[in-house]
Image: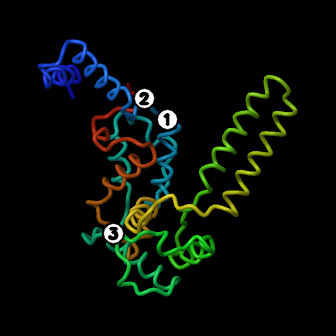
Amino acid sequence: MDFNLSLVEVGLTFPRFPLQRQAQNRSNAMAILNDITTLDNYEDEDIFDVVVKLEKSFNLKFEKDAFLYVQTFGDLCDIITNNVQGTDSEDCTSQQAFYKVRNAISATQLVDKNSINLDTKLQDIFPRHKRRQKIQELKNELGLPLDILDINSWLGWTIFIGIVASLITFFIKWQLALSGLLFFIAVGWTANKFFAKEFKIKTVRQLTEKIVRENYIDSRRKKGTINRHEILKVIIDTFSTELDIDKAYLTKNDKFSWAA
């Protein structure tokens, strides 16, 4: 992408504006470009945290030196796709996952499965009362891990601020800081474990997509099969979701920070 050309075009789009306005347009465009998140914004630890998620989804286990010569996103994708094992079948995994989700919801919530579609809101299916219990039942029915509930945002921010304040207090009195840190960590763990009731996602569509990303092999109706045409899409979707990177910046030539 020619960034200089793009900025010139921004100025030329408004030829009747005074020079100050054109300069402001260029400045705004540059700010947008600077805010774009790309692979080279992340350290290798962040990248391989995502790789671990993909290992789990595709039922893989890589050796430590498997990615030793990886320089670009394309290099990494090639290694993963070449290692995914299974009989190739061109049926759609997302469709199979949706049917699995729909049947599980119908079985646990005692609703007509034909009333459930991709745009159905989860909060309409699972009222806040007993939501944790019902999601656990759904998880058991699916036979898959399901991390879709979170604590209230105000509580999350309170815990976060408490942890930050405790860390700052280390410069004043480490005993007090350590006590505060342990307290807020314990509160955070307890809140997430027992009181999380807010959905992280909104619709059945998002739930289906999440399941396919995180449990691709187990989402397949017939065990031991894969749709090889879908593997790259799952990799891209996972990186985009986990690292908040626009898919336009996940091309085969995009470089990692250690190769920049």
Secondary structure state at the residue bearing disc 2:
helix
Mark 3 or 1 closer to N-term?
1
| x, y percent for residue 113 | 39, 84
Q: Which residue is identified by label 2?
A: 257
| x, y percent for residue 80 | 38, 51
**Is residue 44 positioned above or below 142 on the image?**
above
Q: Amino acid at mark 2?
A: Ser
Quarter of the rendering occupied by the C terminus: top left
The answer to whether the residues at label 2 and label 1 have Cβ atoms under 8 Å apart is: yes
For marks 2 and 1, give the CA distance: 7 Å
For marks 3 and 2, give the CA distance: 33 Å
Q: Which residue is identified by label 1?
A: 44
Task: Identify which residue is drawn at 84% across, 29% down.
Answer: 174
The mark found on residue 212 in the picture is: none
Q: Quadrant of residue 167?
A: top right
Secondary structure state at the residue bearing disc 1:
helix
The answer to whether the residues at label 3 and label 1 have Cβ atoms under 8 Å apart is: no
Task: Identify which residue is drawn at 43% across, 28% down.
Answer: 258
**Is residue 177 positioned above or below 102 on the image?**
above
